[in-house]
Image: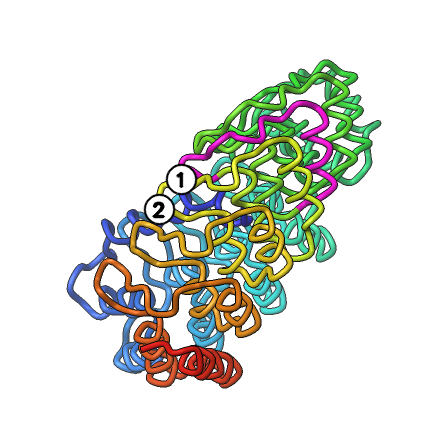
């Protein structure tokens, strides 16, 4: 599971706010300026500024032009605005600055650029929160450390105890966290994205802090963003030592998050071998399915160089012919992700080489469209039917031909085009039509 998963709600909310809010004077140059930023049109931004659009204008929700551009990640436009003299420390309706927008969205490049152009790292919004607090709140430690290096200081207050404890603990200053308990810190307090202090440190691989909070009575199975526990968070990152610690403290191994992912499914999806083995040894359900019907075997099948995990799951009796909600088999996953060893093992154990998914595509299709010529050859040698059509009556040869045309039309990488053309030749030589 990728880091961006946990922020999709924030991003969606931001987009909805943008689409539903216009600038102070709807329909004028400033309105066009905000729209040009949203649709990432730097030339149009430059033209509007030349016509007299207010570079420091604010939208109806109070955000400034610069904050808007930073929040949307429009770095070319951000640089343009800075070159044109935008007020780098202008505050929006709630006292936030562009630097805070960069910090709360985890944009290291924007944070560094704004600091270089004079952004005040000590500025606070109307609630007294600095850019550093925003970065910690959303678990963007790379941004937080950059801000701290450039002069940002975190002031401990009763209303920011979670942020303060998270920052000090992740930096190994546990004695400072101990003092915060005297100020009313609750060990199970939740902060940014619903993280407890235990989960926050589990995600950031701080075994010392995980031990510390467990000793302080932290709820080992407390849930945070997307319904995930500390064990799930650590498993997704492959932090095996922390997974082991949490299991020793009787963390429930088969709890599911909001998308029906267990710790095992999360570890398998990211190919974390040691973590997968730990979880299976502690009784993790090897046949569990996520919201999309994928099993641990389906996930591990796509992991190159992890045939030991495939063998482990097979030895435990997992179903080789299992299908997800799209009809994919583990063999299809192995073929699609270029895992030749996995393909070989699954076929040797009886996987169906000509199984079709809900679209009628076979493992051969998956490998062919990935440009994996060696796997295509192997599948054909093992009996893959080269002229088996999908549910639209299209053959794999036609699909590969269309993919080549798409790459050439849209400027695909030359190496990708070369690989898929080689697949085309292999298919033709095998009699594909």
Is label 1 in contact with label 2 (beta carbons under 8 Å)?
Answer: yes
Q: Which residue is mark 1?
A: 292
44 to 56, vertically: above or below: below
| Label 1 – label 2 distance at C-alpha | 8 Å
- Viewer can see residue 185: no
Q: Give the SS element for disc 2.
A: loop
Task: Please provide percent x and percent y for residue 133.
Answer: 60, 41
Left or right? Give the position of 11 relative to 249. left
Snapshot quadrant of residue 95: top left
**Residue segment shown in magenta:** 272-294
Number of marks present in the image shown: 2
Q: Nearer the viewer, mark 1 or mark 2?
A: 2
Task: Please provide percent x and percent y for residue 366.
Answer: 44, 62
Q: Residue at x 79, y 22 (%)?
A: 178
Q: Quadrant of the C terminus?
A: bottom left
Q: How is the image coloured?
A: rainbow
Q: Which residue is mark 2?
A: 326
Snapshot quadrant of residue 163: top right
**Magenta includes 172?**
no
- Viewer can see residue 430: yes
* SS assignment for the magenta stretch, majority: loop
């Amino acid at each position: 599971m990728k880091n961006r998963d946990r922020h999709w709600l924030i991003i969606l909310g931001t987009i909805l706010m943008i689409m539903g809010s216009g600038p102070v004077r709807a329909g004028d140059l400033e309105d066009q300026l905000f729209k040009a930023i949203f649709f990432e049109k730097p030339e149009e931004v430059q033209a509007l500024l030349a016509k007299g659009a207010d570079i420091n204008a604010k939208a109806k929700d109070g955000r400034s032009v610069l904050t808007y551009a930073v929040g949307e990640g429009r770095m070319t436009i951000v640089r343009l605005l800075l070159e044109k003299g935008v007020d780098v420390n202008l505050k929006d309706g709630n006292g936030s600055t562009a630097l805070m927008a960069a910090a709360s969205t985890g944009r290291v490049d924007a944070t560094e650029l704004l600091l270089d152009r004079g952004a005040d790292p000590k500025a606070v919004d109307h609630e007294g929160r600095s850019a550093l607090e925003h970065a910690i709140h959303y678990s963007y430690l790379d941004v937080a450390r950059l801000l701290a290096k450039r002069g940002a200081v975190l002031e401990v207050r009763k209303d920011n105890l979670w942020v303060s404890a998270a920052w000090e603990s992740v930096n190994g200053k546990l004695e400072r966290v101990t003092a915060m308990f005297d100020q009313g810190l609750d060990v199970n307090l939740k902060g940014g994205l619903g993280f407890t202090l235990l989960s926050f440190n589990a995600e950031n691989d701080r075994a010392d802090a995980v031990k510390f909070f467990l000793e302080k009575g932290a709820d080992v199975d407390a849930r945070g963003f997307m319904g995930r526990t500390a064990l799930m968070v650590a498993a997704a990152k492959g932090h095996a030592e922390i997974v082991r610690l949490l299991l020793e403290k009787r963390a429930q191994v088969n709890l599911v998050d909001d998308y029906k992912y267990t710790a095992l499914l999360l570890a398998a999806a990211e190919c974390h071998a040691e973590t997968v083995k730990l979880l299976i040894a502690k009784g993790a359900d090897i046949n569990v399915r996520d919201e999309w019907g994928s099993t641990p075997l389906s996930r591990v099948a796509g992991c190159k160089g992890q045939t030991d995990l495939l063998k482990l799951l097979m030895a435990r009796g997992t179903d080789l012919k299992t299908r997800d909600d799209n009809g994919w088999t583990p063999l299809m996953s192995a073929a699609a992700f270029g895992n030749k060893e996995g393909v070989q093992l699954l076929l040797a154990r009886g996987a169906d080489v000509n199984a079709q998914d809900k679209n009628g595509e076979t493992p051969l299709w998956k490998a062919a469209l990935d440009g994996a010529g060696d796997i295509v050859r192997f599948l054909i040698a093992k009996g893959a039917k080269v002229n088996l059509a999908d549910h639209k009556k299209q053959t794999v040869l036609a699909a590969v031909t269309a993919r080549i045309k798409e790459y050439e039309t849209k400027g695909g990488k030359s190496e990708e085009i070369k690989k898929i053309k080689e697949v085309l030749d292999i298919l033709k030589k095998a009699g594909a039509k």
